[in-house]
Image (spheres, grey):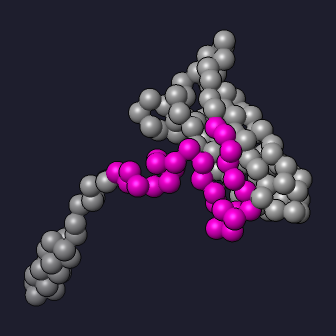
Amino acid sequence: MKIILLLSMAMVVFLSSCVGPYTATREDNALEVTEKVVLMDDKLQDDITITGLRSSRLANGLLKVEAQIKNQTDKSLPLQVKVRFKDKDNFFVDETNWMPVVLGHYEIYTFESNSLSDKPVDYVISIRYAK
């Protein structure tokens, strides 16, 4: 009898300390929310400059993204570029694979990519050193 009473009291104490799920909060200060281009490596900020960004809607409804990337160094830079496309509610709906780009010394390269569907209205370009 004492064991049942102790077990039930332990169960009450255990269950009363449980807390329900926390309320999700929106992080509007994340770079993917506030910026069009995100540099994934810290040193990349010294090595490249984005000299132009442009997006347009193609005849078939796809979103076309163009970015001019300038190599600020006197050596070749092997990079990888990825585009994530967002819908009208700011949710990511399409994503490209990491695409290799090699910039020659002081070269300006125009990177282009198209969305996979007609849903996207915005985009985020991520750039990192090639792995």
Q: Quadrant of residue 128?
A: bottom right
| Res 32 visible | yes
Name the residue nearer the viewer: 117 or 1.
Answer: 117
User: Looking at the image, which residue is at 13% across and 85% down?
Assistant: 6
In this rendering, position of residue 98 left or right of residue 61:
right
Asked if residue 78 shows in the view, the reply is no
The magenta region covers 26-53
> What residue is rendered at 63% in x and 45% in y?
125
The residue located at (84%, 54%) in the rendering is 106
Q: Residue at x 49, y 31 (%)?
A: 87
Nearest the camera: 84 or 101?
101
> Furthest residue to the bottom?
2
Q: Nearer the viewer, residue 112 or 21?
A: 112
* Residue 52, percent from left and from top: 66, 40
Q: Nearer the viewer, residue 2 or 26?
A: 26
Residue 19 place in picture, x, y as percent? 22, 66
Residue 41 belongs to magenta span: yes
Task: Work out whether 5 lies above or below 48.
Answer: below
Quarter in which the C terminus is drawn: bottom right
Please indicate whether residue 107 sits to the left or right of residue 14 in the image: right
